[in-house]
Image (tube, grey):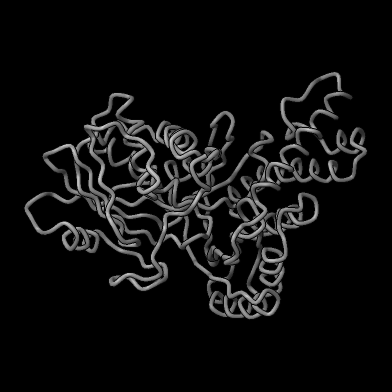
Amino acid sequence: THHPKHSFPTRRSSDLFKRGWRKVNREEMMQLFKNEYGVDNREIKTFLSPGRVNLIGEHIDYNGGFVFPGALTVGIYAALSLRDDNKIRMRSKNVAGEVIVNLDEELVYKKEDDWGNYPKGVMKALKDLGHEVPGMDIVLYSNIPDGAGLSSSAALEVLMAYIILYLENPEQIDRVEVSKLCQKVENEFVGVNCGIMDQFAVAVGKKDHAILLDCASLYYEYAPLNLGDYSLVIMSTNKRRELADSKYNERRAECEKALEIINENKTEKLENLCQATLEDIESFIKDETIKKRAIHVVTENERVKNSMEMLKANDILGFGKLLTASHMSLENDYEVTGLHLDTLVHEALKIEGCIGARMTGAGFGGCAIALVDNAKVEEFKEKVSVAYKEVTEITPSFYTSNIGEGTHVLN
C-alpha cells in the first residue's frame, strides 16, 4: 500500500472561493483556466464529476448485499485545453503546485505527485488498453468538503477517465466499464483496497435517483428519489476515522464466521451471509457477538430492498424510518458508530422536521445523513450543532445537497 486513502486535498480557502460548498458554472471554470494557463485561442472544455453518498445499505456489500448510493450535486470541476505535445499539466484551485505528466515516459506512482497519482493511474490504465491520451492543460476545483468521506478520490478518477474517453468519442462511453477501470486503478496503482461502490455511483449516477447496486454482480437499477419538501443534510462529525480499518477487518472476519457456522448446519449451503434468514441465525449461532453481526447483515439487506419499494411508492416518510432503523442496527448490532456519530444522529432525530437519520460510510467518525423539512433546515443545523458540541467539544459541519448527475460535460 502506498498510503492511506485520503480525500482530494483542499486548501482551507483560496483567493477565489471562500470555504463552503461554492458551486461554479462553466463560465467561471473557463475564467479559472485562463487565470492559470493564460488566454489564447484554444477551445476550453468543462466537466463536473460528483461526490457520492450511500443512502442505506452499510457493511453488507462484502456479505453479498445491496448498496444504495447516489451521486451528489457537489464534486470536482475541470476546465481543459488540448496541447500539441505529449505533456499533461494539472493544477488545482484547492492546493498549491502543479503536477506535470510526460506521456512519453512510463507512468508510475510517485509520492511527490500526491493527488496527481489518481488521474495519472487512470491515464496509464487507458493507455495500456490502447486508448489515445492527448496532451492537455487541466485546472481542477473541488467543492467536496474536506475529509467528509464523500469520495473525492473516486470523483477524480472517474473525471479523468471520462475526459479521455469523451475526447476520443463522446458517444461511446461505457459508464460501468469506467467504474471498473477506476476501481482497479485505486486498488493496483494507488494501493487502496476499495470496493466498487464509490466509482460506480460517480460514473453511473442519475439526477434525483438512487442506485440499487449489487457490488458482486454489478446488477443495478434506479429508484426515483423525489425528496419533495425535504432536503438531504450531510452532517460531518469533523472527527478523523480512527478505528475504521481495524474494525472493518474484524467485522468481516465475524461475518465469515457466521456464514461458516450456518453452512455447517444446513444441507443447502449459502453463497453469502445475506442469503441467511433470521431463523438460521437464531437456530445455529450461539455466540452473542457473532449473532448480532449476522442480524445486522440480514436486516440491513431487507431495509435496502424495502427502501426501493418505498421510493417507488413515493413514500419519503417510510424511507426516513428505514434510515433510522439502519443506524440503530449499526449502533447496537454491528457496533461501528461510536460516540460522535451516535450523538449527531440521536440529536438530529430529536428535532422537529427530521424524518430519519443514519451514519453513512465505514463508521467511527466521518459522516451521517438526515432528511429534514426544507423549512426547518437552518434551525436543525443550529440545534444539532449546539448539542453535538456540548457532548464532543467539536463543531460539526453541515452540507445540503441534492442527488445529481454522474460525471458529465458542463454546458
229 above or below 42?
below
- Identified at 43% across, 37% down, the residue is 182
Answer left or right for 227 relative to 119: right
231 and 181: which is toward the camera: 181
Residue 106 location in percent, x, y? 29, 31
21 above or below 105?
below
Answer left or right for 233 relative to 363: left
9 above or below 130?
below
Q: Is residue 159 visible?
A: yes
Answer left or right for 187 relative to 157: right
* Furthest residue toward top: 267
- Identified at 33% across, 42% down, the residue is 160
Residue 73 occupies quadrant: bottom left
Residue 87 location in percent, x, y? 19, 41
Residue 36 location in percent, x, y? 19, 60
Q: Give the number of callouts.
A: 0
Residue 256 location in percent, x, y? 76, 33
Q: Is residue 208 visible?
A: no
52 and 114: which is toward the camera: 114
Answer left or right for 28 relative to 282: left
